[in-house]
Image: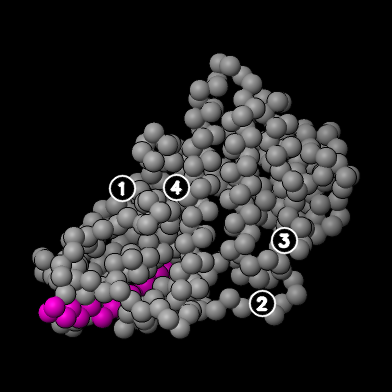
Amino acid sequence: MDPSLLTALLAAIPCPAFYLQGGCAAACNPAAEALGVWPGMSAEQLLDPVPEVPAGEPVRVRTKLLGTVCTLRCSRTDEGGIILVLEARERDALPPAVRELRDAEQELSTAIDLAANESDARNTARNTARHTALACRSLFRLERIALRLEWYYRLTGDGFRPDRQATDLSEWIRTLCQQADDLLRCRGQHLELRSSVPEHWIGSVDRNLAGMMFWELTARFAAMADGADLRFSISRPTQDGLRLAVSIPRHRGELPGQAEALLRAASEDPAAWPDGSFDLGPVSMAAKLHGGSLLLTSDAEGAVRAVLSLDVGSPPTDTLYAPSVSLERGLHPGLVMLSDLLPVETFDPQELDI
């Protein structure tokens, strides 16, 4: 990595951070120097064990830094080096949503700083475009966190009532699935839709609420699928019932939680706390408010399935509205909810038209 870019990147990170390349620390910021990290120290001197960091999105690892157990946020660069950022124990103990908020803010700050300090004239246009896309993605990530928090507090309040409108459910769900399929193709995944409902099936649904449930399920299952395709199916179990099922063929981890409250973990060790923020809690709450339920199942072969059931009985006095997928803030809900999964290039402002 270019030394000037590396210096600007590490300087933009307030937490202790350093850069490993070729098995040694190539650079570090003042906060890391205060801990005793210096350029030239070997990875074995600094870390026990030295973490394995795959290419792609940043990962968190528990290890010992200079003999002290800690959490490091690690990112592999195009040049094969690794940027490691120390997360303080106090920060580990924060709710995951707050940690995600700080990560997105840091990504935005870093992207802006890199774009402003680009020094290589030959690569200015290319790098600035990528840094701008990185900043744009961080804005979508911030919106995702804010939107999930907003839904959580709205759904746990006493005054929330679904705002039902008559909708062509067949067309609406197919539109959502097509948009999700287009986005997931950016990461090599495909979304397959199977429908057993009639064309132009009119039902009464809160489209914002149901849209949130769809994108939450899509984002959670796309992350769990680890490159595998998603399978959606829609059916009509009763005259006024909608059943939407999403499944992945193989999953080796635990099922996502459906906790409907932000509970502090009883364990004093932050490493034992769950990583998922809310998991599918908002979906579970929203389904109940919509007269339905959310059920998660798995089988011996590793297939995982979520079944979302909603009451979509439509009063005859309702007015039919065209399907809509726009948020009040003007950001595409699919890009918002999948912002942690999609590559940076997806958020090129020229392509987003924002």
Q: How far is mark 2 from mark 1, CA to CA?
A: 38 Å
Q: Give the magenta-colored segment's residue range.
A: 302-317
Residue under numbered circle 3: 91
Neighbour tally class for label 4: few under 14, some 14-19, many 20 plus, Cα within 10 Å: some
- Identify residue type, mark 1: Asp
Q: How far is mark 3 from mark 4, CA to CA?
A: 26 Å
Which quadrant is home to the C terminus? Answer: top left
Residue under numbered circle 2: 265
**SS class, disc 3:** helix
Viewed as shown, does residue 15 lie left or right of 333?
right
> Does the stretch in magenta take in 79?
no
Neighbour tally class for label 3: few under 14, some 14-19, many 20 plus, Cα within 10 Å: some
Residue under numbered circle 4: 342
Whether residues under marks 2 and 4 lie with C-beta atoms below 8 angstroms apart, the answer is no
N-term mark: 3 or 1: 3
Query: How many callouts does the rendering have?
Result: 4
**SS class, disc 2:** loop
- Identify residue type, mark 3: Arg
Q: Residue at x 32, y 69 (%)?
A: 210
- Identify residue type, mark 4: Leu
Residue under numbered circle 1: 182
Q: How far is mark 2 from mark 4, CA to CA?
A: 30 Å
N-term mark: 2 or 3: 3
N-term mark: 1 or 4: 1
- Identify residue type, mark 2: Ala
